[in-house]
Amino acid sequence: MEFAQYRDALGSELTTADHKRLELARALATNPKLLLLDETMAGLNPAEKVHLLALLRRIRERGMTLVVVEHDMKAVMTLCERIILMHRGEKLAEGTPQQVANNQQAIAAYLGEEYATA
């Protein structure tokens, strides 16, 4: 996970993105079958999000199940195979990214028209 360069660094010297990767590495060190992620994209700039999404895809491709709680719908739509969209504590939509993107309630509440597919 590209951490060798940080082996002598203090936590206070790490960027937000580096802290997130460190926490991810700590979780992976336990060799889990299921990884719970909560707002992993929060505080990251667009380039950092691209890097983290690529890392999460590699983890998923190795067979690990990811459960993602995230408000960054672009990240969710590109990372997840199945989505449950919650709104005010209630399930609003469920399905594949395409199904959720075509759900009118989901579009109105979260996604915006740019996610609707024709």
Image: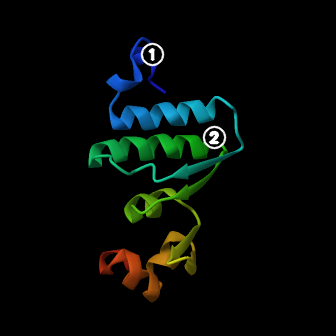
Q: Residue 34 appears at what percent x and percent y?
A: 68, 47
Q: Residue 113 appears at what percent x and percent y?
A: 31, 81
**Can you say whether 98 is above or below 33 in the image?**
below
Q: Residue type at mark 2?
A: Arg
The residue lying at 38 percent from left, 62 percent from top is: 74
The residue lying at 28 percent from left, 44 percent from top is: 47
At numbered mark 2, what does the secondary structure look like: helix, strand or loop?
loop
Residue 89 placement, left or right of 107: right
Q: Residue 49 appears at what percent x and percent y?
A: 35, 47
Determine which of the numbered discs, if any, sits on residue 4 in the image: 1
**Can you say whether 18 is above or below 82 in the image?**
above
How many C-alpha atoms fall within 10 Å of the one at disc 2: few (<14), some, or many (≥20)? Answer: few
Q: Residue type at mark 1?
A: Ala
At numbered mark 1, what does the secondary structure look like: helix, strand or loop?
helix
Residue 29 placement, left or right of 20: right
Kindly give the residue lying farthest to the top in the view shown. 8
Q: Which residue is the site of mark 2?
A: 62
